[in-house]
Image (cartoon, rainbow, N blue to C red):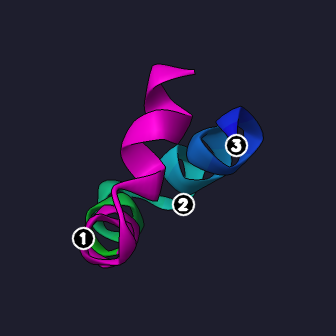
């Protein structure tokens, strides 16, 4: 998941915000990815 986070950062904060918001609704999947 770390690679995905880094890629999103390269694309832009907007994508991160949208991606995080969506995953938080699903089940905080991004939170675990960022933590690890």
Q: Height in image: 29 above or below 32?
A: below
Q: Which residues are magenta?
A: 19-36
Q: Height in image: 3 above or below 16?
A: above
**Could you say which quadrant of the image residue 12 lies in?**
bottom left
Furthest residue toward front: 27
Task: Residue 10 in the image: state x and y as whole percent.
Answer: 57, 48
Is 30 within the magenta?
yes
SS class, disc 1: helix
**Could you say which quadrant of the image residue 28 lies in?**
bottom left
Task: Residue 18 in the image: state x and y as whole percent.
Answer: 30, 75
- Crowdedness near tag 1: few (<14), some (14–19) or many (≥20) residues, C-alpha within 10 Å: few
Real-space CA distance between mark 3 and mark 2, rounded to the nearest whole angstrom: 16 Å
Real-space CA distance between mark 1 and mark 2, rounded to the nearest whole angstrom: 16 Å
Q: Earlier in the sequence, mark 1 or mark 2?
A: 2
Q: Earlier in the sequence, mark 3 or mark 1?
A: 3
> Which residue in the protein does label 3 denote?
1
What's the residue at 54%, 38% (across, down)?
33
Q: Height in image: 21 above or below 11?
A: below
- Crowdedness near tag 2: few (<14), some (14–19) or many (≥20) residues, C-alpha within 10 Å: few
Contact (Cβ within 8 Å) of mark 3 with mark 2: no
Q: Earlier in the sequence, mark 3 or mark 2?
A: 3
Q: Is residue 5 left or right of residue 7?
A: left
Task: Residue 11 in the image: state x and y as whole percent.
Answer: 54, 60
**Could you say which quadrant of the image residue 16 lies in?**
bottom left
> Which residue in the protein does label 1 denote?
21
> Which residue in the protein does label 2 denote?
11
Is 29 within the magenta?
yes
């Amino acid at each position: 998941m770390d690679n995905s986070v880094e890629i999103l950062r390269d694309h832009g904060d907007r994508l991160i915000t949208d991606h995080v918001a969506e995953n938080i609704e699903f089940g905080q999947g991004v939170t675990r990815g960022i933590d690890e």
